Amino acid sequence: MESKKYLEDISEIKNMMNRSTRFLSLSGLSGILAGVYALIGSYVAFTILQEIQYEQNSFRRILISFDAIDQLLLLAAIIALAAILTGILLSYRKAKRLNEKLWNQTAKRMLLNFSIPLVSGGIFCIALLIHDEFGLIAPATLLFYGFACINASKYTLGDIHNLGITCIILGLLSAFFIGYGLLFWALGFGVCHILYGAIMYFKYEKK
């Protein structure tokens, strides 16, 4: 009997330490919806990219019209905004259910560690865009997003680390298959988000 109580006390202490050092309000359902948004965006982007022309030389360059670039950037902004707002809303709902604060020191640390690689990657992708290296944008976004997930996983659910590793692998593969970036982008931001979001939802939220 005392042994059982001892184990329960240890479990409670462990849970308290996790709550104080990890952001546990991250919603798996928001990951699923972010993946759905990404897949829809990939389909829309595919229709826009029908205007692409290829120039065969020592390096396969992808030439895109300025109108197509504007449409793709607007599409990316809409998807990102929808995913962020959905994540905030569902994480707030989860935090309220767990009787925890959504915005605390752990959440700030997680956001900071997530933002550093992500912002760096965004600036790098702008440089690629300026130099017309469109074929490398998909690999770069997947790689830097993977780095961001791994960096932030120290302060949230461990499944985020696995998502980051998967995105890095897809980013590296994408770098060897220039011209298929949209497919890898859909796999990384779409399918993987749905997969890991579902794992997180059924593991931590579905009771």
Image: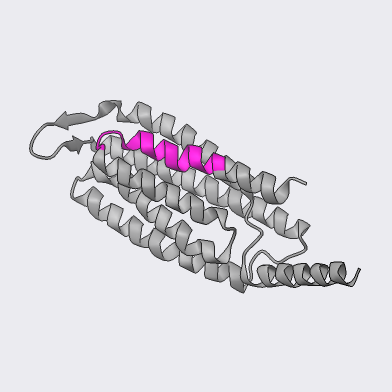
- Is residue 178 part of the magenta span, yes or no? yes
- Is residue 193 part of the magenta span, yes or no? yes
Q: Is residue 177 above or below residue 171?
A: above
Q: Quadrant of the N terminus?
A: bottom right
Q: Which residues are magenta?
A: 177-195
Q: Is residue 129 above or below residue 5?
A: above
Q: Nearer the viewer, residue 60 or 54?
A: 60
Residue 202, image x, y percentages: 68, 44
- At x 21%, y 45%, the residue is 133
Q: Nearer the viewer, residue 4 or 178?
A: 4
- At x 31%, y 41%, the residue is 174
- Furthest residue in direction right, as rendered: 1
Q: Is residue 128 left or right of residue 88?
A: left
- Residue 183 sits in quarter: top left
- At x 72%, y 67%, the residue is 15
Q: How is the image coloured?
A: one colour
Figure label count: 0
- At x 53%, y 54%, the residue is 160
Residue 85, image x, y percentages: 58, 50
Q: Is residue 108 above or below residue 189?
A: below
Q: Is residue 29 left or right of residue 73?
A: right
Q: Is residue 3 left or right of residue 173?
A: right
Residue 5, image x, y percentages: 86, 70
Would you say the magenta stretch is mainly helix, strand or loop? helix
